[in-house]
Image (tube, rainbow, N blue to C red):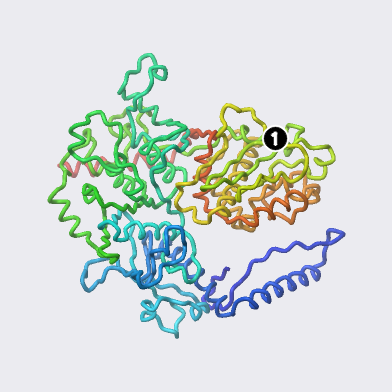
Amino acid sequence: CSGNSSNLSAAVLNISIRAVSSSNSATKYDIDRQLHDVVNGFLDGLTSLLSFQTIMSHVSSVVLQHRLRSSLSSSNGSGGIAFLANGSILPRKSGSSDLPMKAPPAIPFFAPDNKNEPNSLQSQSIHIDMGGLASFCVLPLEQQQYNNASTTIISLRGLLVPPGVTLIVGGGYHGKSTLLQTLASGVYNKIPGDGREYCVSLANAVTVRAEDGRYVNRTNISAFLNQLPFSPKSATPNQKQGDRNSVSVTQQFTTQNASGSTSQATNVINAIFDLSSPLLLIDEDVSAANFMARDGRMRALIQNESITPLLYRINGIYTKLGVSSVVVVGGVGDWLDVPHQVIMLDHYNVQDVTKKAQSVSKQFSHGHVQYAGRGVVHRLQWKDYDDYDGTDDGGRITPRPRCIRNVHDFLPPIDGDRALYADDHYLRIQLNHGNTLRLEPAIRRSSVKEVADHNSTVAKATSDCDGNDSYDGNDSEMSIDDNDSDDDEKGEIDMTKCEQLLGRSPQLYGIGLCVAWVLHQVRLSHSVSDLPKSMMDLLQEMKETMDVGGGIQAMIPPSIKQSSTTTNNSKGHHSNSQPVTTTGPALQQQQQQKYAIRPRKEEVGMALLRMRGLQFEELPPQPQLPEEEDANREAETQKQILADLWNN
């Protein structure tokens, strides 16, 4: 649904239609007639099931959520990272249900009362111009007092979470994790009646947690871990245990089985530098304790601790990198030394306790303790070692953009627009139980006639999300390309602990299609250029392709389109254009899966980073232009002048 006019009075449906003609050409009249028939048939079927008021209420709810979320990130918007409307029902019916809990016993959400806390900035109103859709908006009773039926402006009052470091505190079972889960789901639009329709977060917020056993490849986690123990055979001749040069191990950290702390450190780095997320959502309950914090007694006992806890870094992450955090804590008071705002839940009621938390911090603070001479222990600046003492790049903790190295382990190399091998190559997408999937290279032994009929299929997706055998599209013999038979887990992606994957198997299947598309684009870029694209750029390109190409349909491998489409264009099966209706194996494959839900680019990035066997490497630094060097030099000069003035 789209519409930017303030006088919007109707929903606009974007419908793609392909004119079918025996001569492959259709007059404008034919296309108009087909479009008219399709739209009328669609609307007739829809209105026979739902009332016009119900349809427009749904449309207005989605538009309002979208505009609420956009107002968070806009330069002249609310200036927050999340908003939760008064009257929302946050708890779910059960742990396995997305339905809201009935109220009562559920307690509606309310922001802190400004009457009792006059200095609180957390209770705010947001105003959204809905144009002609305003009359269809169904608001909670608690919001109706702020709205006038004679205007197109919708006013919502609730909790506005400002940028920075925010703590959510409270006793056990008082609603802390439920509030954080609402923020995590706030990246999606919800249907009317969900209870959280008007609870939104920044669109690319990411949850971060410990993930024991996850796959990690060449990730720079030296901001959080250094001086790791290493086996004698992995050490250089002049390297000793605890040597600072061992930081290079964590600059290229690789493991098949990450621990709680290393996996959570990797997830933080991935979210910030690989996915460009501006908001981290962290729950103490599912985090590694030694990664989150370390108290003074433990610092005194353990001198050679390789972990720099997130507690020490989280302020620097915001002040230097501009990434906000919302952290649920209930057992470690040291966290009260670092937040910009503190939200407390008491019997599911929200209070602003920022001032009280600051007072408690002053009474118990260890803020005077220095951490290795690099600043106050709980407020380390995000600086590379070379910023401190002029050393070389061996102390760099800020990762560079990364690219995918070994796409040819999953897809065959190409020459121009064709695979180099005569056999028919494709990727199989296999969904398993528990939010795991697998992409594996496969070779289908095809006859010459089959290759001609299906235009040398390069990629094909199948699934067995219901536990059935994977469907290979025809009765021909299929053999798996097992060049790496010693690694049975190659291509496996475990998304079990990615908590924002709410669409279950259809969304997981959409992720599989997007991952296959990205790998295909990497292979294409290798064939036309020696300069690889960063994963961040590929994910953005994928998002833009779906935005203009029909959503998830644009991710269906172009090589499984009808041969008639590709014969008109020698490079048709590399096109990002909207897919057309397919026949044969491709159609049967789509019917088996039913449908796929479009994922965010963040979930696709998570899947790529967890794909076992996929390798990454940092791109070389881009040379600075002379004017950039002059600007940096001038900035450093100004910093030095200010520092001298302060010291004198």
- Image location of residue 95, percent across then percent down: 42, 58
For residue 442, which quarter of the picture? top right
Q: Residue at x 75, y 48 (%)?
A: 585
Closer-to-camera residue (438/564): 438
For residue 261, which quarter of the picture? top left
- 122 with respect to 495 (left or right): left
- Image location of residue 231, percent across then percent down: 38, 20
Q: Is residue 626 above or below residue 334?
A: above
Closer-to-camera residue (170/387): 170
- Image location of residue 255, percent across then percent down: 45, 31
Q: Residue at x 64, y 58 (%)?
A: 550
Closer-to-camera residue (504/42): 504
Q: In the image, what residue type sits under mark 1?
A: Ile
Query: For numbered disc 1, what is the local secondary structure?
Result: strand
Split into 4 quadrants, where in the image is the N terminus?
bottom right
Q: Residue at x 61, y 48 (%)?
A: 467
Residue furthest bottom as drawn: 150
Q: Residues within 10 Å of mark 1 (few under 14, many from 20)?
A: some
- Image location of residue 313, percent across then percent down: 30, 43
Query: Is residue 277 at all visible to an observer of this figure?
Result: yes
Q: Is residue 106 above or below residue 332?
A: below
Split into 4 quadrants, where in the image is the C terminus?
top left
Query: Is residue 638 at all visible to an observer of this figure?
Result: no
| Mark 1, residue position | 414
The count of marks equals 1
Residue furthest top as drawn: 237
Q: Residue at x 51, y 69 (%)?
A: 63
Residue furthest right as drawn: 23
